[in-house]
Amino acid sequence: MSSRIVPNKKIHSIGTSAQRKTMKGLVYDGPGKIAYKEVSKPEIEKPTDAIVKIVKTTICGTDLGILHGKTPSVKPGTTLGHEGIGVIEEVGTGVSHFKKGDRVIISCITACGTCEYCKKQMYGHCKDGGWILGNLINGTQAEYVRIPHADNSLYAAPEGVDDEALVMLSDILPTGHEIGVINGCVKPGDTIAIVGAGPIGMSALLTAQFYSPAKIYMIDLDENRLKLAKKWGATDTINSGTEDAAKKIMAETEDGVDVAIEAVGAPATFDICQQIIRPGGHIANIGVHGKSVDLKIQDLWIQNITITMGLVNTNTTPMLLKTVTAGKIQPEKLITHHFKLSEVIQAYEVFGNAAKEKALKIILTN
C-alpha cells in the first residue's frame, strides 16, 4: 500500500514559528494516507509537560506499520513519530531537571516514574505513559512535540556527541539491546542468529557484541544489508532468498544456535527461529507482528527453550548513552539517507522501498 501524497497548502501567518499557534507535522489520515500539513502547535497541558522544538527525527518500521493500518490504536489525525532530539522550548511548573534551551534526547517511551510498572523499570507499561508518542498522542515528526512526564522521558544530550547518533538512542538501539540481546540472554561464546538485517536487527548486531558471542549469523533477503552486517560484526551471513537458512545453520552447527533473534515481525522469519534453536536456547522476538504465527509447540515443548517478546522499556538507555559518548559504539553508521522535515513524504517513500533505495535509517532535519 503506497501513501497518498497530499500537496502542501501555502498558509500565510504572522510572526515567527515560536509566536504562531500552528506548525507543520506529518499526520496519519487513515490506512495508506499521510500528509505533511499545518496542525496545532502543542501547549503545556500538565505541570510535568515539556514542549520540545525538534532538531532531528527519523522514521521507524513501526511508523510504516501504522501507515499500512497495522496499529489500530493510532487514530486518523495523529501526528506520527516517536524518536528524535531537540531543544526545550517551554517546561511546566512541575519539571525540575530541564529548562528552556536544554538540548535533549526524546525517549520513545513516556514514563511517569511512580506507578507499579515504572518502579519495576517496565516503563513501556507505565500506567500514564508507555508508547504513546505518535500512537495515542501526537508525535515527533513535526516542528514541535509535547513530552509528558518530561523529567522521566527525556535525557540530557551530552556536548560533543553527534546529533544523529543520539537519535538512534530514542528507540532502535535500546529496542535491539533489551528485547533482542538481553531477553535472549546472549552470553560469551554463544552462537546466535539474527533474522532480519533492518535497523532493529542491526541494532541487535551492534549491541550483541558487548557480550562476546563466538558466532553471529545474520539472515536477510537483502544482499546490501548483509554486506553491511558483515562489515559491522556478523561472522556469517545467509541470504534466505537464495538458500535455506535453517538447513545451512543446522548443517554448520552441532544442533542449532543458542539464541535466535527475530527482527522482522513476519510468520516466515519467526518460523526460521523455531527451526534453528537448540535445546536450552532462547528465541527473542523483537519484530512487531500484525498476524498470528504457527507456534510449533509439538516440536519445541521437549527442547527446554525460552521464548520472549515485548515492548522496549528503555531502562538501558543511560548505559547505552555512555557507550555512545565514549565512542564504544557508533549507531550513526546505520543512517543512510537525509531529508528535510518538509520532505517527509518523500522520505517515507524511500524508507518504504528500503531494498531498492538501500535504506536503513533516515534522518529528518527540522
Image: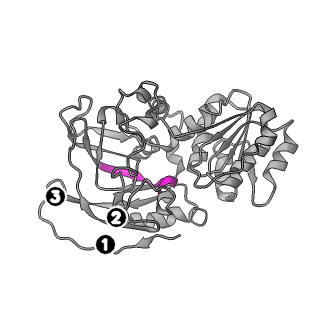
Residue at 71% from the left image edge and 50% from the top image edge: 294
Q: 10 Å neighbourhood of mark 3: few (<14), some, or many (≥20)?
A: few
**Looking at the rendering, which quadrant does residue 12 occupy?**
bottom left
Residue at 81% from the left image edge and 45% from the top image edge: 249
Q: Are marks 2 and 3 in contact (CB under 8 Å)?
A: no
Is residue 160 within the magenta segment?
A: no
Residue at 47% from the left image edge and 68% from the top image edge: 32
Q: Nearer the viewer, residue 362 or 195?
A: 195
Residue linked to disc 3:
20
Point out the residue furthest to the top here. Answer: 119
Chain part drawn in magenta: 54-63
Q: Amino acid at mark 2?
A: Ser
Which mark, by number, is residue 8? 1
Q: In what element is the residue under mark 2?
A: helix
User: In terms of sequence position, does the residue under pointer 2 or pointer 3 come before the other?
Assistant: 3
**Looking at the rendering, which quadrant does residue 78 occupy?**
bottom left
Q: Number of marks in the image?
A: 3
